[in-house]
Image (cartoon, grey):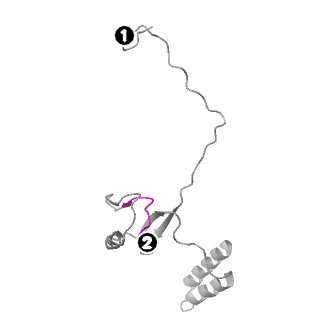
């Protein structure tokens, strides 16, 4: 048996750590939303850093956005950012028939093109699944 590093003859060990059984574990879900930089507003807080393609960090995580920061991100070609919370509502307006009519209006000029008609059908079926 070896002696402790301090040279003493005490070979006792530290008491074992208590095991906490049944302790509730609290988990928090951090809400983040990926938005377009054009949707950003001063006062929003970044949930993730804004990084350029060369991996240079433009703005760090937790930064509170200002008008100047948003303008600089747009100038540097940043398209999307991730912010804390859910500041942009994702609710769709109107009932399914109204949204389908708006889709038909969007595709009205290119409806005779078979590829565009196929694209319209895919979008309509996706809308129907989400309704």
Q: Can you say whether 11 is above or below 116 in the image?
A: above
Residue 93 in view here: yes
| Side of 86 where 45 appears, left or right | left
Q: Position of residue 112 (x, y in %)?
A: 57, 90
The crowding category of the residue bearing disc 2, from other C-alpha atoms within 10 Å (few below 14, some 14 to 19, many at least 20), is many
Q: Can you say whether 52 is above or below 94 in the image?
A: above
| Side of 2 where 57 appears, left or right | left
Q: Can you say whether 72 is above or below 50 in the image?
A: below
Q: CA distance from mark 1 to mark 2?
A: 64 Å
Q: Position of residue 41 (x, y in %)?
A: 43, 72
| Residue, disc 1 | 7
Q: Is residue 5 magenta?
A: no
How many numbered discs sit on the rendered protein? 2
The crowding category of the residue bearing disc 1, from other C-alpha atoms within 10 Å (few below 14, some 14 to 19, many at least 20), is few
Per the rendered image, the range of residues in magenta is 41-50
Camera-side residue of 109 and 39:
39
Quadrant in the rendering for residue 72:
bottom left
Assign a secondary structure to mark 1.
loop
| Residue, disc 2 | 40
Residue 107 in view here: no
- The quadrant of the rendering that contains the N terminus is top left
Q: Position of residue 100 (x, y in %)?
A: 64, 84
């Amino acid at each position: 048996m070896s002696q402790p590093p301090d040279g003493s003859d005490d070979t006792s060990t530290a008491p074992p750590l208590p095991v906490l059984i049944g302790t509730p574990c609290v988990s928090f879900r951090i809400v983040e939303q990926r938005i377009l930089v054009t949707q950003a507003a001063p006062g929003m807080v970044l949930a993730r850093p804004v990084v350029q393609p060369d991996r240079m960090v433009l703005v760090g995580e937790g930064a509170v956005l200002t008008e100047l920061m948003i303008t600089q991100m747009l100038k540097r070609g940043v398209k999307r950012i991730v912010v804390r919370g859910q500041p942009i509502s994702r609710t769709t307006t109107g009932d399914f028939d109204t949204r389908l009519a708006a889709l038909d209006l969007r595709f009205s000029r290119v409806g005779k093109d078979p590829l565009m008609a196929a694209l319209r059908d895919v979008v309509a079926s996706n809308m129907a699944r989400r309704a």
